[in-house]
Amino acid sequence: MSRRSVQVRGIVLTSFISISALALAACTPPMPPDVLAARAESQIVCGTGTVEVATPGKFTGAMDYVGQALTSVCPEQTTTEVPIGTPALVELSERTPTPSVITDFQAASCPSDKVIVIPAFAYPVTIAYNVVGLEGLVFTPEAVAGILNGTVTSWEDPLIADENPDFDLTLLPDIALMSLETPDGSVEAMTSWLTQQVPDLWSQGVSGTLEAGQKFATQEDLLLEMTSVESSIAVMPIFTAFSNVLATANLPVKGTDANGQEVDTVITTDDVQLYKVGSGATTITTDEAGNILASPAVGGFPVEGNFDLASSKIVLGEGAGLVGWPVEGYAHLLICDDGTDSALPLLYAQYLVRLAGQGSLETFGVTPLPEPIRVQTFTPLRVTVNMDEDVPMEEAGTVPNEAGVEEAIVDEEADLGIDPSEAEADPALVE
């Protein structure tokens, strides 16, 4: 199979990498995550053909967003989403994959190859409900636990009413809890939060399914019923609720942030910056095979080393603590790896964790990986970070690489739609 490799670079990016190399030579501390990422961003290898990605219903379109961005750089490489459960060389899991899930994927999709697993993105989760005029209710962990275990069935229950004195909660139908009959990453994230916050009230532990309420086979069935039943309620990603014009609950955060500052605040569902902060409240583990796994991010306080404020381009308000949205699921990619560096599944995954791929996912509505976590994914995906040599400055054209394969040199500023003169004046535009 023929293939082309595309080395993406620009004058501003190259200069930045050159300066970084000099800085590394002069000091011993490790390179910051954003510097490491900038080096890895300097190259992209293109393939020829189509890769299928098995995608859960709630994220239909997300993998196509990444694929379309990749095709804009690599015209001969395309992506096709297929329903989850279809054997495909790449699969998106909405939950943290268990060993049995990884084994099942390997048996169904790549019995002769190894499997690579990495986090793909985070997604904020809340309680969505169908009651016109009640947008923005505050649900405490106690209230959420009561709703999900079936003991809170009235909007006038003190666990809801006491936190929302400015809302008229009278004369509403009883709460109708709905969920999927199969494990759901959103429910897993929410039950992780409840287990952390109110373990005495939530006895079911971390689970992808709920014992109470009405069950549905698919997300589409659940949403169809929710949008037609007043007082229906369900756990779901915030972007899904917004897309279906459902009200969303705000959630509280209490505790001590990384700076020792006491936090007692309500986080609203409309602040994208706080989704990013909250995505750092995850635990990262690496299994014996080198797979990287991210737990649901709960609590709102980033774990040390999992979030970098500067590289996330976030500016918090004066006096605001480092605290974000308190309930987020983590989607993962499962990738068939045949051991070659030109295989389409590997190339697709490498692009997904690039800044361009993560930007496409953010446009879709989910939350990009925190920079320190994104950089960790480079290792299993065999993304090389050149610490000693500068990125070459050839003009646009083709040059042979070490393997004798032609490399098309693409100007990164043009690829991102940035005027080169503007990029030179403001290097941040390249990122």
Image: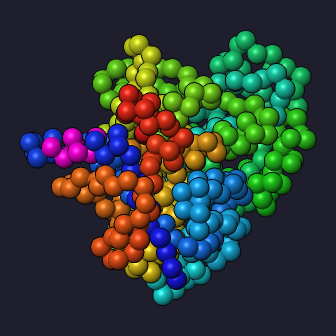
Say whether residue 21 is magenta: yes
Residue 426 quadrant? top left
Up-down relation of residue 54 to residue 199 (above or below): below
Prevailing secondary structure class for the magenta stretch in the rendered image: helix
Up-down relation of residue 276 to residue 5 (above or below): above
Residue 389 quadrant? bottom left
Residue 356, how many percent across, how many down? 50, 48
Q: Nearer the viewer, residue 269 or 160?
A: 269
Residue at the bottom extreme, as displayed: 112
Up-down relation of residue 29 to residue 263 (above or below): below
Q: Which residue is at 63% across, 49% downward? A: 187
Q: Quadrant location of the C terminus?
A: top left
Q: Would residue 360 be found to the left or right of residue 263 on screen? A: right
Q: Nearer the viewer, residue 383 or 30?
A: 383
Q: Which residues are magenta?
A: 16-22
Q: Which residue is at 60% across, 32% downward? A: 142
Residue 25, how many percent across, how many down? 11, 47
